[in-house]
Image (cartoon, rainbow, N blue to C red):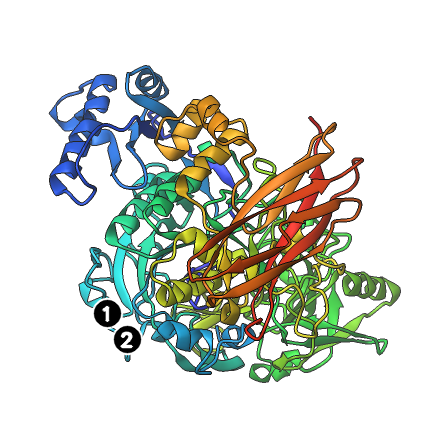
Amino acid sequence: MGLRWLFVFFHLLLFCLLPVLGSADAQGMQTYIVQLRPREAGSSGDQAMLASKMHWHLSFLEKSVPWEGEEKRPSSRLLYSYHTVFDGFAAQLSEEEAAALRELPGVASVRADRRVELHTTYSYKFLGLNFCPTGAWARSGFGGGTIIGVLDTGVWPENPSFDDRGMPPVPARWQGVCQGGEHFNATNCNRKLIGARFYSKGHRANYPTNPSDAVSLMEYVPPAGASVAGASVLGVGAGEARGVAPAAHVAAYKVCWFNGCYSSDILAGMDDAVRDGVDVLSLSLGGFPIPLFEDSIAIGSFRATLRGVSVVCAAGNNGPSPSSVANEAPWVITVGAATLDRRFPAYVRLGNGRILYGESMYPGKVDLKNGGKELELVYAAGGTREEMYCIKGALPAAAFAGKMVVCDRGITGRADKGEAVKEAGGAAMILANSEINQQEDSVDAHVLPSTLIGYREAVELKNYISSTQRPVAKIVFGGTRIGRARAPAVALFSARGPSLTNPSVLKPDVIAPGVNIIAAWPGNLGPSGLEDDGRRSNFTVLSGTSMACPHVSGIAALIRSAHPSWSPAMIRSAIMTTADVTDRQGKPIMDGDGGKADAYAMGAGHVNPARAVDPGLVYDIDPADYVTHLCTLGYTHMEIFKISHAGVNCTAVLQRNAGFSLNYPSMSVAFKTNATSAVLQRTVTNVGTPNSTYTAHVAAPHGVKVRVSPTALTFSEFGEKKSFRVTLDAPAPRDNAEGYLVWKQSGGQGKHRVRSPIAVTWVVD
């Protein structure tokens, strides 16, 4: 699919990750990640200590891997030696050698590497970012001084989004490098793209090199993009492309290759990024939920958080199924996807006069000869499955040449279907949503006149085709239209809660723009990797929670720049408690299926950067409280150790913290069968005006009584903390329910509203 980094205030790309075990090679070798019990050592910046750790890691290999001559020393099996976010290493081992390692003293776990599949010009305006002197950009200096580390598929340094004109100097604390490689060298870095590294050992241990994958950072575009005037996709969606944090620096860590991303490579990227000095880690990687102690991103991000790094992750694209949300760790910011009020209409005018609404970014003016005239419709309703889904090589030219081909969504990528139709001689294409897609409208920059229609329209289209001997239609392109639709709304594909592994924490945390985002693209390729009509574009259009993630990473950078001393938990709280729950029309945010979005779909709501830099109150969390939280979930000593790299006695911890509840900005309660009451403890810190009072306003979930004590909080100074208790009484099990608690500032300075969603569900013991 080519370049994976989008320009959305960081340019990140679309991922839909599915974790699977790495495949073994012909010799029965497989990559394993080995976690060790930590030993005493110097500081992480001590080079002697790093060398010492390397020798320590090798000592375990020498005890478990047979010596096979000088050319096959045990050290030749080592892929990575981790030092910062993880204590351990990655190595190529046989199943027997892995078993032997598990038995060695000092080894905490040995697990097979996991593979995860690869799952703007307007959105900054939609988020309310502007040049107002009191706005988020002005208050934060456009994110200047912050460093965002992006783990993805690489960079395309020639893209204008990397222009460093007007950028501040590189922070003195930066310890990273600009790693050279194929088509990429140190001169490609500048004051915008300040660092670059790539990691392929885990991937190449399982798959041979793909010629299309440059052995370097080439292929990605970052967050916090520079301003690019006149950005568009071949003329559609034109505007000034600008990042959420345009003055922030970007460091790229390429961990994804032609066949996905491996946990061993991801951990290595996180390990270096934290040691290099990033302030925010942006990972558009997320698939299906797995236990935290098996999740390398959760494990690596725990130590990153301890070091003050905000970690922002994509929620995944497995919606609208419930409990599909990934990256559920409470120490990360989990981001779902939402729509913009920008549309790209491309109507289908049927031969019977009916007009079906569709959307497309294909610029009709380029090929009016085909896109603008009536064409015969063809749909392989009675053909093969491959023909119905327009799989490459399956479309006979005799049946499809010169016609408008109807392709069902699914199996292959949307842009791939267009290429298949064009190869078969098709003149145009209609992509028809299936029932599972409903009215979801992710558009693409296709290689021929095309449009995407919703499920209702698809049913009508197919009924028309079957009703006449010669069905015909034409596509009428409507360009770009803004403000014609309710937005934001939760994208249908955005993953949902409640969390299966951690129901007492509401995930996703927030939603952000993630549908039809104008994204940076390699300048020498067309949007689908083809040259199309010979024109070039530095941008394409992408959709996914991977598009939403970098928006929030940019907002985190703005807050970090405005408040350098804030912890990652305070930054997350500011983003969550100021989020919007109404759309641009002042109505409740809708879900992709047409109903009202609930907290399990949108978390605390849609991000609002202007309010997030000045939240009034924040919920902070001591990192030790995350361990206590894991104890409340019933995690074992070893499971917690795998996450925290520290031993813990949960019995003693829970005795010292009776009635503990994590000081999270949202409130989620999972009642068990016989439970009828729950008490949540919370503490807020005043980061607004001194001498201020906040009063509690509650909307209780249906069938649940909610009491807040005290009902008013008075602060005399900045930084002061106040605690309160929320009691929920639920007399009988029922369906999931939600409400909210808002602390409203009173008096003449009463501009702050600190909102926490309350989500209640019932689980079977």
Q: How far apart, in angstroms, are the residues tagged by discs 2 and 1?
A: 9 Å
Mark 2 near mark 1, Cβ–Cβ under 8 Å?
yes
Name the residue nearer the viewer: 441 or 660: 660
**Dividing the image into 4 quarters, which one contains the C terminus?**
top right
Q: Where does label 1 land, which residue? A: 190
Q: Is residue 74 above or below residue 716?
A: above
Image position, residue 207 (x, y; %):
37, 40
| Mark 2 surroundings within 10 Å by alpha-carbon count, few (fewer than 14), some (14 through 19), many (20 or more) | some
Q: What percent of the width, then of the height, locates residue 117? A: 48, 46
Task: Compare residues 392 and 279 and report the one nearer the observer.
Answer: 279
- In the image, taking residue 492 as reference, residue 641 lies left or right, namely left
Amino acid marked by disc 1: Asn
Q: Is residue 359 left or right of residue 109?
A: right
Residue 245 on image: x %, y %: 40, 70
Residue name at image x 54 percent, y 44 percent? 326
Tell me what residue is drawn at x 43 percent, y 29 percent: 640
Q: Horizontally, is 51 left or right of 222 in the view?
A: left
Residue 748: tell me if it is visible.
Answer: yes
Q: Is residue 429 above or below residue 85?
A: below
Query: x, y (%) of residue 643?
Result: 41, 34
Q: Which residue is mark 2?
A: 167
* Residue 551 relative to residue 393: left or right: left
Relative to 649, residue 599 above or below: below
- Give the number of the mark in front: 2 or 1: 2
The residue carrying pointer 1 sits among few (fewer than 14), some (14 to 19) or many (20 or more) residues within 10 Å by Cα, namely many
Element type where label 2 sits in the image: loop
Element carrying mark 1:
loop
Q: What amino acid is found at the position of numbered circle 2 in the picture?
A: Met
Q: Is residue 420 visible?
A: no
Q: Residue at x 18, y 45 (%)?
A: 45
Query: Residue sitting at 36 percent across and 69 percent down?
Result: 143
How many marks on residues? 2
